[in-house]
Amino acid sequence: RNGAHCPFAHIKADDVPDVSSLTVKEEPQAPDSPPRRPSGVAICRFFAQGLCRNGANCRFSHGETKQTATGPALSAETSLLLRRLETGELPMYALDVECVATGKTHNDRAVAQIGLVDAYGRCVLNVYVKPKKEVVSYLTPLTGLTAALIDERGVPLEEAIRVLRSRLPSSAALVGTNIGQDAKWLGLTAPGDCALLVDLAALFRAWDGSRYVYFSQDHCAKVWLGAVRPPNVAHDAVGDAAVSMALLGCYMR
């Protein structure tokens, strides 16, 4: 009804060119990125139900995002995970661990604090752990931990993990920066102790054209949240877990 004033093109059927012989030039694809469908196509309703039999050959979208100059396409699994988190299908908890040094090498570490927060950043667990091995350094400028604090409030690691498991639903998505290492230190499994692990380091990494670049939690918090850690303020497991949850919320928005 808008005639010449219509904002859309009025093309006659005879004016549509034959595109059957044309090919689409694909952008260079990042390593491990799945084959991508043309952008803008409809979401595959069978994939959303886990029933698509066409896999990478499906002509409908499996939820991938388009690759850009600074980031490769998100995998279908990651896109589906984010949708499950957005809909509340998976309860979300963020975990962080602070460690002390029990030796002189970088790998000589023992868990000394465990922090767990819920999806709203509220503290669910804050427990200090007394390491079995002799502590060489409490790394106080980084961790905020001291001998007096651990001596006064520290409990055996086994007791701390028992309490953690009692407060972490097995159906939850457990969020954190390099969360796999924290889970390994605590002996947590996914699925099992939780449904899955969401590594923020993988979500916030950037593609520079040849490799992934990873960023610290402090850097991500500064860039994405505008939050800067004041000088001489140490890390804290509960505080860092809350930052992780805030970062995930920002990423999902």
Image: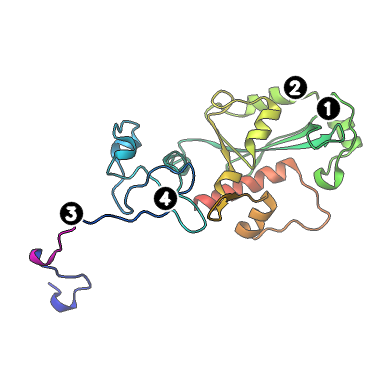
Q: Bin the neighbour count of mark 3 within 10 Å (Cα to Cα): few under 14, some 14-19, many 20 and up.
A: few
Question: In this picture, which residue range is highlighted in magenta?
Answer: 14-19
Q: CA distance from mark 2 to mark 4?
A: 43 Å
The answer to which of 77 and 26 lies nearer the viewer is: 26
Q: CA distance from mark 3 to mark 1?
A: 68 Å
Residue 143 drawn at (x, y percent): 81, 43
* Mark earlier in primary sequence (1, 2): 1
Tag 3–tag 1 contact (CB < 8 Å): no
Mark 4 element type: loop
Q: Bin the neighbour count of mark 1 within 10 Å (Cα to Cα): few under 14, some 14-19, many 20 and up.
A: many
For label 1, the residue is 131
Main secondary structure type of the part rendered in magenta: loop
Query: Residue, x 77% and y 35% (percent of image)?
Result: 113
Residue 115 drawn at (x, y percent): 71, 37
Query: Is 253 drawn above or below residue 175 in the view shown?
Result: below
For label 2, the residue is 159
Query: Residue, x 71% and y 29% (percent of image)?
Result: 185
| Residue 199, magenta (yes or no) | no
Amino acid type shown at disc 4: Thr
Q: CA distance from mark 1 to mark 2?
A: 12 Å
For label 3, the residue is 20
Residue 137 drawn at (x, y percent): 89, 37
Q: CA distance from mark 4 to mark 1?
A: 44 Å
For label 4, the residue is 65
